[in-house]
């Protein structure tokens, strides 16, 4: 039995399977900061498992949703009421998306952003030991939301505490609060989401508290995926109707000595060099 660090943490298994068995069947694991992050960034894994009998998506939301914006019908909600609403929305998304399990760890954003905080890392180690997924989806290192960065760091640190033989085969850092179209095309991990608009729309629309709160995340995320598909290749007709991009973080769990900052900045520096080189060629330099 897992014992998480926060008293309000819990695990939902939509189909009622025993928790240990539910974790063991998971092949694709999404670890996000906030309620709705998984649906926006890890649809690739959700969709891969949705119709499959031998694949299961597991979800982890790390924070409690207390700092959510609120206007309109939610304007008078207290932090406690907002946390309840957001938890219920995430659980409904897990049911609609046929997740193998949905863990909500109930950490505050302040704690997640605190360097060296071991509580979230310890919770994630327990989950990873229980399910040992093939692929992990989390936030990407160039994300501009500091809570997202805190989760990403905790994910890498947690995986590094596992024996190498049981670590995931791949870790994908996904788009949320900053897209990845700036990366060199050869370095992008491309998630083809063609044909999943209905599933995506069903999941995105569940998070009414955020959409009604003044942010049309549902439209923005779908628009980004469509734009990625059309603008990915300047010389070919569209081969997909929706693409999401990810940064391959797998080297960070293959080499524990690899610095996260240096690794992330390598993508930025190689992009800068590609821009410089293209301009210099046009100028004959």
Image (cartoon, rainbow, N blue to C red):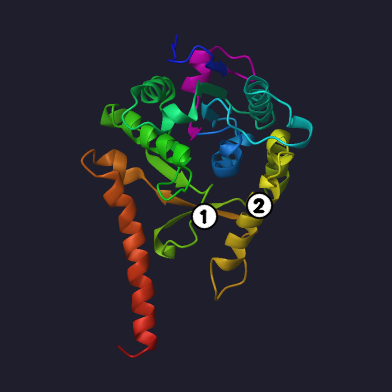
Quadrant in which residue 14 is drawn: top right
Can the viewer see residue 239 in this picture? no
Range shown magenta: 12-32
Q: Using a 10 Å C-alpha cutoff, classify the residue at mark 2 as few (fewer than 14 neighbours), some (14 to 19) or many (20 or more).
A: few
Q: Is residue 247 above or below residue 59?
A: below
- Could you tell me residue 15's position as x and y percent? 64, 19
Quadrant in which residue 99 is drawn: top right
- Could you tell me residue 33's position as x and y percent? 50, 34
Q: Is residue 20 magenta?
A: yes
Secondary structure at numbered mark 1 = loop
Looking at the image, which residue is at 37% across and 38% down? 169
Label drawn at residue 179: 1
Residue sticking out furthest to the right: 73
CA distance for labels 1 and 2: 11 Å
Q: Is residue 281 above or below residue 57?
A: below
The quadrant the N terminus occupies is top left
Q: Which residue is mark 2?
A: 220
Q: Is residue 27 left or right of residue 193?
A: left
Looking at the image, which residue is at 37% across and 65% down? 271
Q: Is residue 32 left or right of residue 74?
A: left
Residue sticking out furthest to the left: 257
Quadrant in which residue 115 is drawn: top left
Q: Is residue 266 above or below residue 32?
A: below
| N-terminal-most mark, 1 or 2 | 1
Label drawn at residue 94: none
- Could you tell me residue 176's position as x and y percent? 54, 47
Can the viewer see residue 214 in this picture? yes
């Amino acid at each position: 039995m897992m014992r998480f660090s926060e008293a309000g943490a819990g695990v939902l298994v939509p189909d009622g399977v025993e928790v240990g068995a539910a974790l063991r069947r998971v092949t694709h694991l999404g670890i996000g900061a906030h309620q709705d992050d998984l649906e926006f960034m890890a649809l690739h894994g959700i969709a891969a498992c949705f119709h499959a009998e031998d694949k299961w998506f597991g979800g982890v939301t790390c924070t409690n949703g207390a700092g959510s914006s609120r206007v309109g019908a939610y304007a008078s909600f207290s932090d406690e009421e907002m946390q309840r609403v957001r938890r219920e929305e995430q659980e409904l998304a897990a049911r609609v998306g046929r997740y193998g399990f949905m863990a909500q760890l109930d950490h505050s954003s302040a704690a997640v952003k605190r360097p060296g905080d071991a509580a979230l890392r310890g919770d994630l180690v327990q989950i990873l030991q229980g399910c040992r997924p093939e692929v992990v989806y989390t936030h990407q290192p160039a994300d501009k939301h500091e809570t997202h960065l805190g989760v990403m760091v905790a994910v890498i640190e947690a995986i590094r505490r596992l024996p190498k033989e049981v670590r995931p085969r791949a870790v994908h850092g996904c788009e949320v609060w900053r897209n990845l179209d700036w990366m060199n095309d050869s370095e992008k991990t491309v998630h083809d989401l063609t044909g999943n608009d209905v599933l995506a729309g069903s999941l995105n629309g569940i998070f009414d508290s955020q959409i009604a709160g003044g942010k049309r995340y549902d439209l923005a995320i779908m628009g980004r995926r469509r734009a990625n598909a059309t603008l990915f290749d300047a010389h070919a007709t569209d081969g997909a109707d929706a693409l999401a991009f990810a940064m391959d973080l797998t080297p960070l769990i293959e080499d524990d000595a690899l610095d996260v900052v240096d690794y992330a900045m390598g993508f930025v520096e190689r992009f800068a060099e590609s821009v410089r080189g293209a301009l210099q060629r046009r100028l004959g330099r």
